[in-house]
Image: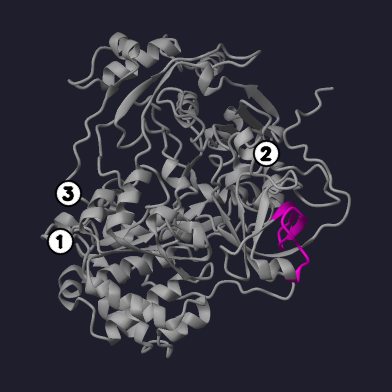
Amino acid sequence: MRSRTGNQAIFGGSYGWGSAGRLHHAQSQLHRFLNSIGGYTRSVNDYSRGASAVLLPHLVGAQAALDLRYRPLSWADIAEHTDLLVTFGGVRRSNTWVVPGGHARHTASERAREVGRTTSVVSLSAQRDDAFADLDAEWIRVMPGTDTAVLLALIHVLVADGLADEEFLARHTTGADEVRRYVLGSTDGVPKTPEWASSISRAPAHRIRALAHRMASGRTLINVVYALQRGGNGEQPVFAALTLAAFLGQLGLPGGGFAHGFGSMGDYGVGVAGPPLPTFPQGVNPVPDFIPCARISDMLLHPGSEIPYNGGQVVLPEVELAYWAGGNPFHHHQDLRRLRKALSRLDTFVVHETHWTPTARHADVVLPVATTLERDDIAAGAGDSRLRSMPRVAAPLGEAREEFWIYTELASRLGADFSEGLDSGQWLERIYEQWRPAFAPPFDRFWRDGGVDLPQEPYRDPVFAAFRTGAPLGTPSGRIELVSAVAGHARWLEPSQPTEEFDLRLLCNQPTHRLHSQLDMGDASQSTKIAGREPVRLHPADAAARGLSTGDVALVRSAQGSLLAGVLVTDVLLPGVAQMHTGAWFDPSAPEVADCVNGNVNVLTRDVATSPLTQATSGAHVLVAVTSYDGPVPPVRAYDPPSTR
């Protein structure tokens, strides 16, 4: 195939969250192998914050956008300096346990509790339990997809009531006058008043107005969770929140300004950058072709077509082979009917797996690989307090092999060198010794001791601190660009509205009881199922109108597909809003009943980009219909191995 089409016909599909180890990191190993044989078509950005990753460099420059992720204000800064934390999308406790690479100790929950003791917190969300109880957050109800309207109304109050920091806007931003005209209605005839926002969002106008005055009266931090930018026009709430922070004028002050990640990641706001960590070198990819990661179905269904992206154009390459390791596109991608059709266009689909996941079931070649418990490794995450040894506890089961061994064998048969003559144990020692700073012991002692403590000196220069005192940003103007040549300014763009058929807004957020779709068959995940499948939460009024009670089985439909779910009735949701977690394993075993009988929400979500600018995922919410399912309930077969006859 490579001699006929070139290596651009190979898609390196690993998404990278399959392992906590620094050596046996699925994405690094797959990409090193593919680079060793001539390269591959790659994906860029991610499903977590794909819209923000493209947008923010245009507004604050590349370095400040990076610092917003890795050097934000810390939980300790908030506890000491912040009077009011206003968080759009809440601060969910379960997300503070999730760290790429893992942490030796999960500290974010305790640090957030300290904030709850010292700082007033306001959570704007469609779910009361989006902010965990220890924060004692005030809840302002906001319908999904309408946060931007509320943010613009808050700016309107600051402008109309003379509360905006005009000195900061003049010295540190560009475009403030255009934003001011927009929120006052001078450009489109629609003043973005609290009453206007209330008619869209259901947030009471008097509470929006009062919140704006509270924000201007003390030190305020505005936080936007990742989920808000995973929707249609998902860039807008992030853009509007940054704009609001600029009008308050507190960016760069201790405890004030803008954050994008509290309640989304466990390493966000720990306040420690930490040293670089050991990495397994991937080599150099000579193939220039790429796609935004959420456009995989477009690539396979429409090769050769052009799509706009980040102010330019991207040609979707023609791919014949996809090689996937360490991820599950049936969890993170949308519109599974469309994805299945797209994957069927491949000549060959190769998957590494530890279980018969939905992705493995769709593969042409499945190579069984060792789990984290069946291989030696070392682990740490960003800002971690300890680099830990991970000695295996058992040998690989059956025919499973370390991925390192698989790639070594494949590369050898293709005339390439993956291992450089070393086995995985020798590579583990190599990446440690190449990394080892002065404070760390030699590898043998590190392994014997079970790890080494890492420096925990807090950084003193969080994002925007130097900018406030005169250092320019990496934007064309050196300032915060509230009007961008590429992105325009923050604006209200109407989302899809409920119809007579699809009358509920379904929130599709990350699970509280498993990591993504991992170990959905395990006891922790299974303990949360209702009627043997993923729950759908409904407000009591919506459940009563449909004749549904907790424990019933419901049929949930959208324009894209259908699923069965167990019903959970709760008053933590706004009326008109339903909620399901992502990550249930896709089960199409009874298509005459539903596209998935196990409750995988991505049979419902739309595979539509947030915008032509970012081409990111928009799967955080979708319009659905929920009805009682009264027929024979099919068994869940998602966890049964396929027949090998």
Q: Is residue 557 magenta?
A: yes
Q: In front: 517, or 86?
A: 86
Q: Quadrant of the N terminus?
A: top right
Q: Magenta part of the protein: which range?
A: 545-567
Task: Tell whether label 3 touches label 1 (CB within 8 Å).
Answer: no
**What is the x, y in percent for residue 495?**
55, 72
**What is the x, y in percent for residue 422?**
41, 10
Could you tell me which residue is drawn at 48 percent across and 17 percent down?
416
Q: In front: 62, or 298?
A: 62
Q: Quadrant of residue 358?
A: top right
Of tags 1 and 2, the one toward the viewer is 1
Crowd tier of the residue under label 1, counting other residues whose Cα lies within 10 Å: few below 14, some 14–19, many 20 or above: some
Q: Earlier in the sequence, mark 1 or mark 2?
A: 2
- The residue wearing badge 1 is 468
Give the Cα distance between marks 1 and 2.
Answer: 51 Å
- In the rendered view, tell whether residue 281 sits above or below residue 499: above
In the displayed structure, does residue 505 sit left or right of residue 159? right
Q: Earlier in the sequence, mark 3 or mark 2?
A: 2
Q: Earlier in the sequence, mark 1 or mark 3?
A: 3
- The residue wearing badge 2 is 346
Q: Quadrant of residue 195?
A: bottom left
- Asked which secondary structure carries label 3, the reply is loop
Label 3 amino acid?
Asp
In the displayed structure, does residue 25 sit left or right of residue 571? left
Label 2 amino acid?
Leu
**What is the x, y in percent for residue 119?**
29, 60
Could you tell me which residue is drawn at 47 percent across and 25 percent down?
29
Give residue 253's mark.
none
Label 1 amino acid?
Arg
Task: Tell whether label 2 touches label 1 (CB within 8 Å).
Answer: no
- The residue wearing badge 3 is 461
Task: Tell whether label 2 touches label 3 (CB within 8 Å).
Answer: no
